[in-house]
Amino acid sequence: MANRTIPRLLQTPAVLLLLVWMLVPLGMTLFYSFIRYVLNSTVRPEWTTPSWSNWRGFGNYEFVLNSKDFLFAIKNSLFIVGSILSLTVVLGVLIAVLINRSFPGRGIVRVLLISPFFVMPAVNAVLWINMLLDPVLGLQGIAVGAINDMAAGMQDAPLVGWFFNLWPVLEPISFRATQTSAIAVIMMVTWQWTPFAVLIFMTSLQSEDQQQKEAAVLDGASRWSQFRFLTLPHLGRPMAIVVMIQAIFHLSLYAEIEIVSRGNGNKNLPYLIGEFTNNNIGAASATGIFAVILANIVAIFLLRAVGKTLME
Amino acid sequence: MGSIVLDKVQKKFGDVEVIPPLDLEINDGEFVVFVGPSGCGKSTLLRMIAGLEDLTAGKVNIDDNDVTEVSPAKRGLSMVFQSYALYPHMTVRKNIAFPMRMAKVPQDVQDAKIEAAAKSLNLADYLDRKPGQLSGGQRQRVAIGRAIVREPSAFLFDEPLSNLDAALRVGMRLEIMELHTKLKTTMIYVTHDQVEAMTMADKIVVLQAGVIEQVGSPLELYHTPRNKFVAGFIGSPKMNLIEGEEASKHDATTIGIRPEHVSVSTTEGMWKGTVGVAEHLGSDTFIHVHNTGLDTGEGDLFTVRISGDIAVSHGDTVYLTPQMDQLHKFDAQGLRIA
Amino acid sequence: MAIVATTSRFSKIAWPTLAWVVALIFFFPIFYMVLTSFKTDADAVKPEFLFSFTPTLENYANMTENYDYWRFATNSVITSVLATLFALAVGVPCAYAMAFNPSRATKDVLMWMLSTKMLPAAAVLYPMTFLTKNVFGVFDTHFLVILVLCLINLPIVIWMLFTYFKDIPKDIIEAGKMDGLTTWGEVKEILIPLAWGGIVSTALLTFIFCWNEAYWTVRLTTIDAATLSKLIEGNRAPEGLFFGRLSAVSTAAVGPIIVLGWFCQKQLVSGLTFGAVK
């Protein structure tokens, strides 16, 4: 039928909603990023209302670029995202290969492994920073304490006592300092997202050509060669996708940073925007535009990869 | 009633013209086969008749009514798809009933028709199964059943047998032909298989690149192909087409001779060659002859079909003699010279 | 031959054991949280950590008193369910039209929709706060949370539904057309029954994403429409933390979702990779 009206009509609500959702706030951010706009100022009260007359050009961008926090937040964002990505991909491939065979209880293993992914980020952060990593009350504190006690107890033992006398008293690590809290964030997010990588790689491994593997066995390829020359190349595309999707999610990581690091100086871009938003909206908006640009760089690659399979 | 007239129908996908303006008349009760290589536009043409594809220009008339703008369901046609297109979530009974349910046919009439269709298609035992539990042939019958109960003015078949294995295909071919004799309803059947076309059709429409190359009865096409394309497409094994010196002896650019119109001798004949592969089918023997010195478009390979068996094997020298009264002649444009 | 046999016997035991160990390590934090939820706050921080305690249900019994849990949980349920339904109501027609009547723009529209998902939320934090507080006055309302949850998940909903719908053979829809189905009939008689499994898993996954959302639900609410994310986020401080009751409320917040997640882990792949990994 030549009638294209109905299909168009059916798409309209979704398209309109998303269009408004994207354009309006982003347009406002773009506008604010070019004007002087603060929430409280006794000296310059005219700056507290957004207006074209407060035009600042690229002033906010300059201000942001020159601020120490921005550079640190960018570096820290990249450090956190980069670490999570490498850890999840390596662990993901290893675990996926490990469970990509049949063994007793494989279904349960899968279920156990995937579970962390469904834990809400806020609970994830609270659970790790308090119950697992706290230097006194958390599992870390308890474990370190137990090891120290055991070493102390063994010092009077015959024959091996001298060994435990030389044993240093272990100090639990506090994960609430600037850099250690970044490590804590990396740990908890890796814990949460490794299952995702495993799931993707496993799905992809199941579509691996078994005849190709059999051919390789007949050609005399070892287990390692099969993995290196068949499995890894086969996983290339899923790896790229896992990396890109995670990059997009983790660049806007917020709840974990907020919970683990509040006030200790560990920050990423979204957190910095949150700080600026308390007063300097111009700077917050300029930072926001930088975040959009950063996300777009990743998104372009991801969309290209996804687009290829779209109409098959 | 079920006469269908296509009046200058044309189809473009974007800027690509897949079917240039085309005229065709299909009479009531005819079994018409659209045949051609894949991508020739035969399915598109069928779908345009069905109303599943809109026309870029032109008109479709069914029983003298212009149905160009009429929706598929209201054209009074039934279609059997290559994939059968059964509703997988409905039982066979519900599948067959579906078009009647849409047309709000009373329940008792529906039941009666389903019973009748199931009986004639040997589906009575399967009415409460779902399509997933049926074999390919049974699914095909359900699809036909769904088409029959609507009592359409014409049936449209879109390569209905191509998903079946060879043995079933022959059986279903016969069933469809019997159905046609019984119902005497117009049928339009699309296939790329010229054997199906030859065996089933009252009228064959040969298409290439959206253009009708020839319309005629199977034997017309076999005996008097209008051009080189039809000559090469209809008949199996393919007609030998010879160009060059040999053709100019007959005042033609190309001459064609069917494999079955050549006699083979080990001692003497018009053309000499070496046996390559000989396919012994029992009833027939196909001999592929090399080194004939003829310009056949495939090097100098020449195919011969001998009825019965003949004792030749790879490497033997044979002599070929065409039956001169069965020679087809074509001019530089590829058209038949009378 | 002998070597082959020994390696295979070794690997028959070693690899599965390793797999189990890895799985247990990954699951341990969740197990520890659930275990702790049955301890009193005092037991929870004792060095004899794992099993030396008397299990108690008091943490669960006191969830309302300690945290006003049910109020947040109710908000989470209401907003997640309604946002999911709303996203489906907008997404199903859209995905249907895209899958069965694709135009040349369809691919680009889908890509664009995905790209909206990739915008960092923080970039529009102030405009959103300003618009909802000062312009529309919907800050901290269920309506706002539902709308935002729906919008951020809409691209994924449409994308997942599109991949499911695309798997329905076009022939079947066309057969339906020949048999006299209207557009609505196609949706009701063919699309929904055939894609039911896909629609349900899309709904489940969307629900999970809504439930776990932790940026907008925290930043655009204070108390009236605050969800479980907000509740947990508010209890981040280590000082005076009560691990027993915190574990109970956390378990109550994530337990149902983890179980739901087990049922749709397969769909998760297509849902999160936008059909790019099969």
Image (tube, rainbow, N blue to C red):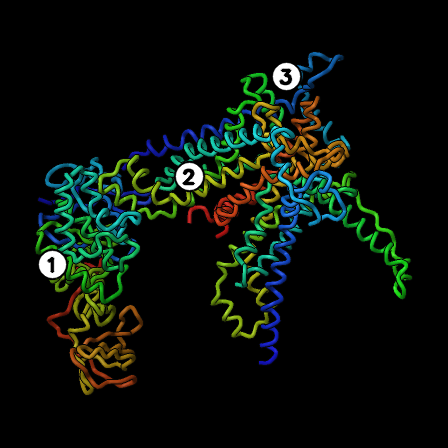
State the residue position of label 2: C106
Q: Find disc 1 in the rendering and name its residue.
A: B178
Quick one: A49 or C32, which is closer to the camera?
Answer: C32
* Residue position for label 3: A50
Please provide percent x and percent y for residue A183.
73, 44
Disc 1 residue crowd, few under 14, some 14–19, many 20+, Cα 10 Å: few
Q: Position of residue B253 (x, y in %)?
A: 22, 64
User: In this orientation, which residue lies closer to the viewer: B318 or B238?
Assistant: B238
Q: Image quadrant for the C terminus of chain B?
A: bottom left
Alpha carbon distance from label 1 to label 3: 82 Å
At x 19% / y 61%, what residue is drawn? B172
Asked whether the beta carbons under mark 2 and mark 1 sit within 8 Å of each other, the answer is no
| Numbered disc 1: secondary structure | helix
Task: Indicate the secondary structure of the residue bearing disc 3.
Answer: loop
Q: Chain of mark 3?
A: A
Q: Please, what is the three-letter code of the amino acid marked with disc 3?
A: Pro
Are both tags, 1 and 3, on one chain? no
* Viewer-closest of A140 and B64: A140
| Distance Cα–Cα, label 2 vs label 1 | 45 Å
Q: Residues within 10 Å of mark 3 (few under 14, many from 20)?
A: some
Residue at 57% in and 72% down: A221
Q: Is residue C144 left or right of residue C249?
A: left
